[in-house]
Image: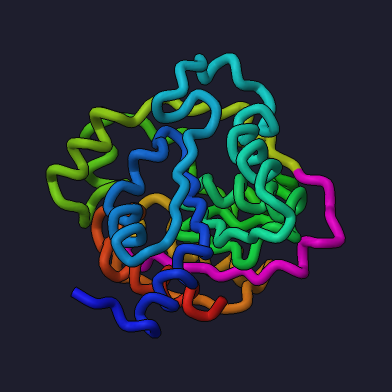
Amino acid sequence: MEVRKDEQQTMENKSKIHFVLVHGIGAGGWCWYKIRCLLEKSGYKVYCPDLKSAGIDPTDPNSILKFEDYNKPLIDLLSVLPENEKVILVGHSAGGLSVTDAIHRFGKKISVAVYVGATMLRRGFLTDADIKDGVPDFSEHGDKREFQHKVIYNMSPEEDATLGWMLSKAGPFQAISGATFTESPEIDEVARLYIKTLQDHFLKLEQQDAMIKKWPPSDVFALESDHSPMFSTPSDLFGVLAKVANLN
């Protein structure tokens, strides 16, 4: 079958767009498998790094005491990108901290930063008000599977909830809660988008709205999803990300 020149040009343009998808605490690059497939089938390049101690990284999370150590795999990935290449950087949940850290360090290599039901704080965990308004309560306990089913994957397919329960790991909470960033002049030069997760039982809607009000992004989208739209509404999330890519 002959490929039309305009279609070929479109595919070539898409192949130049790099998505970097960053997982939240306790998860890993595996959590993006549906979104990665959708993006790659559409011609985009996609990276889903495991942060330190996450996914298949064997590091003991209790040994990760500083956020810069936890986020090192993402920073290393961005540091080796050619100067003329930019990425669309997407962070989910606590992965938003990784995105903000990357903006401070490599703003010129990021075309758009996308926060998906994510922590979006300009300088990390700085004040009691930030913690109250913008950070989920990591102290919630109970049976892990029941907690995830009711709070993290409450709208997600049972098989994805089971996958999450089987693959999720303990996270380096000390490193996450101690994340603070040195202000960079590039921080306001990177376009930021926020995707609200309207049925989120973990990062509550009022917390998301508080962060958006405190540090307004360029645009805000909304999904009728739980805390894990990559599982509960993958087509809708893909649609927003594709729209973002088409604007760049």
At a point 26% along the width and 67% down the height, the residue shown is: 235
Please state the horizontal and vertical placement of residue 193, each as a whole percent of the image: 56, 70
Q: Is residue 160 left or right of residue 104?
A: left
Furthest-left residue in this view: 158
Give the camera-side residue of 199 and 109: 109
Q: Is residue 129 visible?
A: no
At a point 37% along the width and 64% down the height, the residue shown is: 43
Q: Is residue 26 left or right of residue 193?
A: left
Please state the horizontal and vertical placement of residue 3, each as a whole percent of the image: 28, 77
Please state the horizontal and vertical placement of residue 162, each as a whole percent of the image: 18, 37
Q: Is residue 46 left or right of residue 113?
A: left
Q: Quadrant of the N terminus?
A: bottom left
How has the structure been colored for display?
rainbow
- Examine the rendered structure and indicate whether residue 1 appears above or below residue 171: below
Give the camera-side residue of 219 and 46: 46
Please state the horizontal and vertical placement of residue 139, each as a whole percent of the image: 46, 33
The span shown in magenta is 181-199
- Examine the rendered structure and indicate whether residue 5 appears above or below residue 222: below
Q: Main secondary structure of the magenta part?
A: loop
At a point 53% along the width and 33% down the height, the residue shown is: 51
Furthest-front residue in this view: 2
